[in-house]
Image (cartoon, helix red, strand yellow):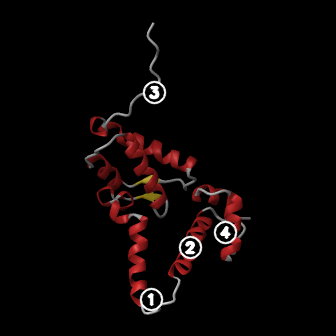
Amino acid sequence: MTPKKTDKKPMDLKERKEEILALVKQYIKLAEKQIGTEVKDISKDAEEYLLTYDWPGNEIELEIAVKRACVLSEGPLIRVEDFDLKHRQARSIGKFVESRLKGFMRNIKRFEKFNLYEMVIPEVEKSLILMVLKETKGNQIRAARLLGINRNTLRSKINKLGIKVKSNK
């Protein structure tokens, strides 16, 4: 007797173009549950973009792209620019922060005894926490989950950084 194979190997998306939109809708719902994103829909342009994109990988790549787009999109509609699969590296968080800091660095170089690290890191951390708290309407448990830290760590950071938390009540 041959054992049943229960785990399927993900197939290349190039072979499954007709399944892409159904998978996208499934991954949007998954993002709502796992990440706590608001209910999202996808624009017709974004659907067309995903159908014509030359997928180099399998459905796991699509899942990651959809979840990322759910997080990056502003409002209830996912647009083409929220995916930006061809220029993903250019839109990375590291590149974004680097571009913002370059102008700041030009002005700060003239100060020799300046602790840039201790000035910038708390501000970046504070901005990130504020954005996540706003997105979660002040729900610290959800915010901690999104940030990948525990609630006590988040509370400690809130106090240390002087963040005022508005109640979601």
Q: Which mark is residue 157?
A: 4
Q: Is 78 located above or below residue 108 in the figure?
A: above
- The residue labelled by disc 3 is 7
When asked about the image quadrant of residue 84, the answer is bottom left
Name which residue lies at 45% across and 27% down: 7
Residue 88: image location, x then y, percent = 34, 59
Tag 2–tag 3 contact (CB < 8 Å): no
Q: Residues within 10 Å of mark 2 (few under 14, many from 20)?
A: few
The answer to whether the residues at label 4 and label 3 have Cβ atoms under 8 Å apart is no
Which residue is identified by label 1? 108
Of labels 1 and 2, the one closer to you: 1
* Of labels 4 and 1, the one closer to you: 1
| Label 1 Cα neighbours within 10 Å, binned few <14 / some 14-19 / many ≥20 | few
Label 1 amino acid? Ile
Q: What element carries label 3?
A: loop
Which residue appears at 39% of the width and 87% of the height?
Answer: 106
**Mark linked to residue 127:** 2
- The label nearer to you, 2 versus 4, is 4
**Callout 1 touching callout 3 (CB < 8 Å):** no
Which residue is painted at 68% across and 77% down in the image? 162
Query: Separation of disc 4 and disc 3 at Cα?
Result: 42 Å
